[in-house]
Image (spheres, rainbow, N blue to C red):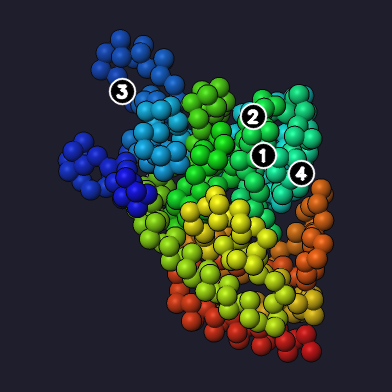
């Protein structure tokens, strides 16, 4: 089946729920057993494999996990041993697998443009645990072999990377990591499983912030972790069992509702993002548009090779004349349609300034030969693009006046 069809039908079993199109919400902590033998058997059930106690899953969360697993790894994924588990946030979906895989004395590789909290976790909690993190150039490709050590347990990848949207060569990185015995974990939130097939490109674990495009409506927090059978059995399942990581059944219901429309929404986001990006390309206030789905972008060739589509989150760099708090206030404070907020993937458009030079430690920003102005991150929502462009046009006029 095509992804659009799977998103519509996965996780639905009307015959098991009185014919209802949508699976009901199951609120449960205690599960009762009819016999002593059933009670004994429940002690052998692993978290996520059957009803034992609410924290280990309910029919509501099992349905979403199965649907996301099939979206991530394809038809028959569950039968092949792939598994998906839910947790409370996208951040938890990043940090929990890292915690599961690496321990004291181990080494982890993290891209220098990683999601900020991934870096904070690596520099903070991991360091206190005795796990060493090295930050690497996201464009290193097969050259990552020089950074791999005998104790390297995990290589984290993002494509494209946070804030500056570089597109790494994940198959090349995965090939070298596997030769060294390390696992590869991808943050696949930007493209979602619709537009990037992480396991086909060599990843062992794929995570996403369900908060973003799956949910689609900026009203829930959730993360998902999908893993191969080996990675799931050895690392993911035990940690979920031991820590009691779980997700709300009400949020699982809302996420499943979002999944049904995600293919349609992402097509609209993709097209709208490109249209706004093209308009920004023609503006004198903009020195560069950073969008891997646009032909001028340095990452376009890899995007075209590996991706099936694009989302609506990208960046642009202002001309160096436009800097400082007063200029940012003029640009942002009176926007009518774009909001300022630290998320994306919802129906609403967002715009914020970012400062990648304050985060990087292994690679410089800006890159040689690229403009060094203020970086902006934009999420193009589902509003009419003509209205969004008019809002940006007015904002640029205010910015010009403020810059003198």
Q: Are marks 4 and 2 in contact (CB under 8 Å)?
A: no
| Spatial CA span between label 1 and label 2 | 9 Å
Residue 397, image x and y in percent?
66, 88
- Say which of marks 4 and 1 sits in front: 1
Residue at image position (61%, 40%) is 171
- Say which of marks 2 and 3 sits in front: 2
Q: Which residue is mark 2?
A: 178
Upstream in sequence: badge 3 or badge 1: 3
Choose top left, top right, bottom left or bottom right for residue 120. top right
Q: Is residue 307 left or right of residue 17?
A: right
Residue 164 visible somewhere in the drawing: yes
| Spatial CA span between label 3 and label 1 | 48 Å
Q: Which residue is mark 3?
A: 32
Q: Which residue is mark 1?
A: 173
**Looking at this view, is 8 or 306 the one in front?**
306
Upstream in sequence: badge 4 or badge 1: 4
Upstream in sequence: badge 3 or badge 4: 3
Label 1: which secondary element: helix
- Label 3 neighbour load within 10 Å: few <14, some 14-19, many 20+: few
**Looking at this view, is 258 or 273 the one in front?**
273
Residue 193, image x and y in percent?
47, 47
Residue 297, image x and y in percent?
65, 64
Label 2: which secondary element: helix
Q: Which residue is mark 4?
A: 136
Label 4: which secondary element: strand
- Say which of marks 4 and 2 sits in front: 2
Choose top left, top right, bottom left or bottom right for residue 258. bottom left
Upstream in sequence: badge 2 or badge 3: 3
- Label 2 neighbour load within 10 Å: few <14, some 14-19, many 20+: some
Q: Are marks 3 and 1 in contact (CB under 8 Å)?
A: no
């Amino acid at each position: 089946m095509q992804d659009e069809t799977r998103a519509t039908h996965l996780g639905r079993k009307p015959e098991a729920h009185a014919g209802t199109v949508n699976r009901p919400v199951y609120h449960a902590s205690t599960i009762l057993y009819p016999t002593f033998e059933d009670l004994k058997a429940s002690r052998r059930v692993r978290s996520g494999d059957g009803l034992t106690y609410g924290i280990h899953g309910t029919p509501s969360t099992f349905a979403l996990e199965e649907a996301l697993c099939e979206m991530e790894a394809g038809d028959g994924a569950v039968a092949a041993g792939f598994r998906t588990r839910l947790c409370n946030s996208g951040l938890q979906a990043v940090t929990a697998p890292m915690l599961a895989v690496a321990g004291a004395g181990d080494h982890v590789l993290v891209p220098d443009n990683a999601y900020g909290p991934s870096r904070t976790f690596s520099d903070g909690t991991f360091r206190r645990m005795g796990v060493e993190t090295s930050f690497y150039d996201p464009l290193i490709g097969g050259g990552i072999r020089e950074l791999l050590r005998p104790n390297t347990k995990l290589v984290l990848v993002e494509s494209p990377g946070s804030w500056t949207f570089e597109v790494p060569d994940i198959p090349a990185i995965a090939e070298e990591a596997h030769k060294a015995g390390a696992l590869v974990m991808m943050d696949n939130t930007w493209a979602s499983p619709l537009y990037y097939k992480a396991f086909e490109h060599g990843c062992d674990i794929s995570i996403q912030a369900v908060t973003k495009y799956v949910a689609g409506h900026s009203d829930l927090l959730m993360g998902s972790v999908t893993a191969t059978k080996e990675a799931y059995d050895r690392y993911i399942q035990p940690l979920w069992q031991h820590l009691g990581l779980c997700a709300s059944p009400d949020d699982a219901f809302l996420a499943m509702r979002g999944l049904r429309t995600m293919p349609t929404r992402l097509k609209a986001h993709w097209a709208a993002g490109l249209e706004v990006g093209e308009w920004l390309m023609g503006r004198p206030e903009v020195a560069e548009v950073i969008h891997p789905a646009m032909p001028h972008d340095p990452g376009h060739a890899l995007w075209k090779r590996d991706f099936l589509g694009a989302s609506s989150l990208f960046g642009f760099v202002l001309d160096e004349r436009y800097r400082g708090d007063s200029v940012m206030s003029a640009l942002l404070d009176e926007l009518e349609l774009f909001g300022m907020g630290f998320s994306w993937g919802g129906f609403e458009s967002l715009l914020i300034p970012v400062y990648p030079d304050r985060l990087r430690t292994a690679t410089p920003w800006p890159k040689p030969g690229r403009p060094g102005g203020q970086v902006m991150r934009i999420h193009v929502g589902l509003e009419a693009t003509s209205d969004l462009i008019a809002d940006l046009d007015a904002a640029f006029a205010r910015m010009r006046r403020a810059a003198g």
